[in-house]
Image (tube, coloured by chain):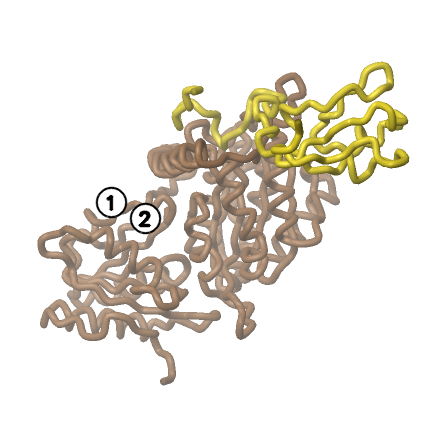
Chain colours: A yellow, B brown
Amino acid sequence: MKKLKSAREIPIGTAIEDAGCSREYHTGSWRNFRPIHDKEKCVNCLTCWIYCPDGCVQVKDGKVVEFDLKYCKGCGICAEECPAKGKAITMVPEEKKE
Amino acid sequence: MPRVAAMTGNNAVAESMRQINPDVVAAYPITPQTELSEEFAEFVANGKVDTEYVTVESEHSAMSACIGASAAGSRVLTATSSAGFALMWEMLPIASGTRTPVIMTVVNRAFSAPINIHCSHDDTMGGRDAGWIQLYSENSQEAYDNMIQAVRIGEDMSVRLPVMVAMDGFIISHAVERLELLDDESVKKFIGPYQSVNPLLDTKKPVTYGALALQDYYMESKWQQSAALLNSKAKILEVAAEYKKLTGRSYGLFENYKLDDAEVAIVIINSAAGVAKMVVDELREKGIKAGVLQPRVYRPFPHEEIREALKNIKAIAIMDRTDAFGAGGTPTFTEVTSALYGLTNPPKVINYVYGLGGRDIRVEDIHGVYQRLTEIAKTGKTGKMFEYLGVRK
């Protein structure tokens, strides 16, 4: 476990001096539902990429590749907004993901 | 060269603000502070200061803008009263928690209801635990002097806390008094240039303000803030000593008025302390050993020093221009009695609520209190501990 800093070691006013430190906070552990991507149905409109509040939709050459599960909270906004016929993203309960 | 002027409390504070020449002021007018913010707006409009004046839509926004501007890296002042202070409430602990040294004049006014525009200390006494340094002022001169010292205290690298400067609404804010003002150059030299800590506008060193801190860091953050406030006492005295060299006017944690050999004493803040001191002079002429302890620094509260100053007094009346409804006495009463706790032969204490909503505290009223104290000192019997002074029942 990471050693916590003392009150004398932290910056005053609890300012955070390291930019981008939310990378260290793995919100993926909150997830109950996992987004499952269907490449066949996906039209790569990137609506999910626009809506994802955590920037978890990984895109390469204009195409959706995968979801970054380290940060995906399973909120389901991507699945809700997906305009593809028959939905290219479905939310599956974590315990049934296999 | 110092100037002698006739000014209201609001004029005097506006003048101190002109001389401080802050980077940002965000304020919303409210009686009895209105004249102050109007006058400062005039300085801005006439190019007398370099200040960015943010005309906000409420006091909640005023304090938010102040915190943001301070975090951005600028010297920030504001002012408010009563309900405006209450509307800032959410932001007050954010200013102290983010350690942004905003300086705010509070022109004391009663809380509603019933609506009343005159003086009670409900606002600043209500906000005494918001983590700000609090300085109280008897008159325009003290309000002016406290403002200039507040900048140095709050911005000091060992402190970095917001500071409130309180003065009585109407009684001081609207009454013309003689006072001595410093020249602009002396004020500029005394306060020095603003030094920022982690300014948001430094794009080469990006920082985050006001982020989440949960079970792992919240307590460390609060301990750090608490220690800074407690430790500010030394800096407050250091700044006062330096200010005395400049002006000849001396300030401490509280004023000890003829307490050293006193048998009876009143503890009282702001303008009414002037009346009490006058009564003490009258009583001393009759051979009655009376004194006054007038707190100036209310946060951090100088417990040890007050215990030392009061320990040999026989009977003390602690008087507040506010009530702490349902508590075991008014705010200053609970502070002072906790300071006296542990003494083997502590003074007898009584507690008065006086002057609410601007009701006059008359010379006869104070004489009456000293008379009762003399009786208590003689008999050792306190009688009723908590009382509203001069209320029709």
Q: Secondary structure at mark 1?
A: helix
Q: Residue at x 86, y 14 (%)?
A: A61
In the picture provided, is B365 more to the left or to the right than B216? Answer: left
> Which quadrant holds the C terminus of chain B?
bottom left
Badge 2 marks a residue whose secondary structure is: strand
Residue flagged by tag 1: what amino acid is it?
Glu
Cα distance between the residues tagged 1 and 2? 9 Å
> Residue B240 at x, y = what percent?
38, 37
Q: Residue at x 49, y 57 (%)?
A: B177
Check disc 1 and report the residue beneath it.
Answer: B305
> Decide: marks 1, 2 in contact (CB < 8 A)?
yes
Q: Which residue is mark 2?
A: B254
Q: Residue at x 29, y 60 (%)?
A: B333
Q: Chain of mark 1?
A: B
Numbered disc 2: what chain?
Answer: B
Give the mark toward the camera: 1 or 2: 1
Q: Residues within 10 Å of mark 2 (few under 14, many from 20)?
A: many
Q: Nearer the viewer, residue B88 or B363?
A: B88
Mark 2: which amino acid? Phe
| Marks 1 & 2 on one chain | yes
